[in-house]
Image: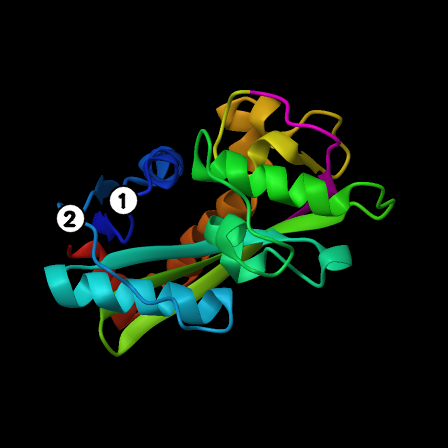
């Protein structure tokens, strides 16, 4: 089985490829990034928009991911704006000094300074599109809290400041195997695998397997 990933984000490509390999899925990286206006109001809507844009460009089964960090005490931000949180007027813009991930983290920690409620969760929604009118969604959530300062060198995005529920380590301090077993994206991919297995005699499954 081969699937095109609707992203040029290196961190996502590495992570998703690693999790799909045991399932017998070969990941195809797009040759170019397709501009997608993420005008959706939810992770699901944006995942669909990404899958549709890449499917139209390449014409092969496409897997899109839209994910982010939700902090209830910050009115749900960064949420669907997670990748560009630093640039939002909400909460004040943050200068990009060493990279966008670092700017996002710096802004989030600034806004949470002195806040005792540091609960947060990662959410990922996957959209697997076989044809324009033929697609399915799965989602995964990982609950936890925001650490006082960044720790660890693994992962990407907000991983250095997110401690999964029951862990003192941040996501960036976990091994790839540990992260895959509990992460929001890992849970969404596991659900996708289970769904395809359950529906293995369906037309949808046969279309996926024929790629």
Q: Secondary structure at mark 1?
A: loop
Q: Nearer the viewer, residue 167 or 113?
A: 113
Dots 2 and 1: beta carbons under 8 Å? Answer: yes
Q: Is residue 148 magenta?
A: yes
**What residue sits right under mark 2 in the picture?**
32
Look at the image and give the residue range highlighted in magenta. Answer: 142-152
Is residue 166 among the parts visible in the rendering?
yes
Is residue 201 among the parts visible in the rendering?
no
Q: Quadrant of the C terminus?
A: bottom left
N-terminal of the pair, mark 2 or mark 1, is 1
**What residue sits right under mark 1 in the picture?**
8
At 56% across and 47% down in the image, what residue appears?
A: 184
**Vertical side of 202 occupied by 179: above or below:** above
Q: How far apart are the two marked residues, 2 and 1, measured between alpha carbons? A: 8 Å
Q: In the drawing, does residue 9 fall left or right of residue 151?
A: left
Residue 159 x/y as whole percent: 57, 34
At 12% across and 59% down in the image, what residue appears?
A: 58
Residue 68 x/y as whole percent: 53, 52
**Vertical side of 120 occupied by 128: above or below:** below
Q: Nearer the viewer, residue 9 or 21?
A: 9
């Amino acid at each position: 089985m081969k699937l095109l990933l609707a992203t040029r984000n290196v961190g996502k490509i590495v992570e998703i490829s690693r999790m799909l390999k045991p399932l017998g899925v070969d990941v195809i990286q797009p040759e170019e990034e397709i501009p997608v206006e993420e005008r959706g109001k939810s992770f699901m809507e944006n995942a669909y928009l990404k899958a549709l844009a890449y499917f139209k460009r390449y014409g092969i089964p496409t897997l899109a991911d839209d994910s982010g960090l939700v902090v209830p005490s910050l009115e749900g931000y960064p949420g669907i704006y997670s990748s560009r949180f630093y640039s939002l007027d909400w909460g004040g813009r943050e200068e990009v000094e060493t990279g966008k991930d670092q700017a996002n983290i710096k802004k989030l920690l600034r806004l949470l300074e002195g806040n005792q409620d540091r609960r947060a969760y990662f959410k990922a929604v996957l959209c697997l599109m076989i044809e324009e009118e033929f697609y399915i969604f799965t989602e995964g959530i990982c609950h936890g809290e925001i650490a006082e300062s960044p720790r660890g060198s693994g992962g990407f995005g907000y991983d250095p400041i997110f401690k999964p529920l029951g862990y003192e380590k941040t996501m960036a301090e976990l091994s790839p195997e540990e992260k895959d077993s509990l992460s929001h994206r890992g849970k969404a991919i596991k659900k996708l695998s289970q769904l395809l297995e359950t529906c293995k005699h369906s037309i949808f499954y046969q279309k996926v397997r024929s790629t």
